[in-house]
Amino acid sequence: MSDTNRISEALDQAAITAVQGAITTIRSQFPFLIGLAADERRMLLKLGDKSRAFDEKASAYMERNPDWVPGYISMEELARTGRCATPWKRS
């Protein structure tokens, strides 16, 4: 194993303050984000690339065929959640 320090950098107070300000801005823009315990995170469903593609196709199908949408699915909530997730897609 190499003893070479791959990162040799120092942060000045201005950089630290700028990052803390950015984090505060993010928290104010996303007040719905909540902290989860490790076991809670493990229990949640994950949306990878394949799952996300399926979710998008299913949503589009439900929009085109509203009579076939189960009663327990709110199209308004589905659209809101989709709009919230769309900007964060990996390219």
Image (spheres, grey):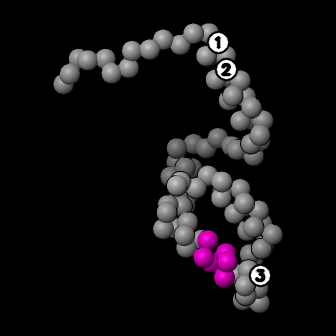
| Residue 88 point in image, percent of width and height | 61, 52
Q: In this rendering, would 7 be left or right of 28?
A: left
Residue 14 badge: 1
Q: CA distance from mark 2 to mark 1?
A: 6 Å
Q: Find residue 5 and report its image quarter.
A: top left
| Residue 50 point in image, percent of width and height | 48, 68
* Label 3 vs 1, first from the N-terminus: 1
Q: Circles 2 and 1: CB distance less than 8 Å?
A: yes
Q: In this rendering, would 63 be left or right of 1?
A: right
Neighbours of disc 2 within 10 Å: few (<14), some (14-19), many (20+): few
Check disc 2 and report its element: helix, strand or loop.
helix
Q: Is residue 35 above or below residue 41?
A: above
Out of 4 and 91, give the one closest to the viewer: 91
Say which amino acid is labelled 2: Ala
| Residue 62 point in image, percent of width and height | 70, 81
Image point (62%, 77%), residue name: 58
Image point (26%, 17%), residue name: 4
Out of 47 and 49, give the one closest to the viewer: 49
Residue 18 badge: 2
Image point (55%, 66%), residue name: 52
Check disc 3 and report its element: helix, strand or loop.
loop
Which residue is disc 3 drawn over? 71
**In the picture, which quadrant includes the N terminus?**
top left
Check disc 1 and report its element: helix, strand or loop.
helix
Q: Is residue 43 visible to us here? A: no
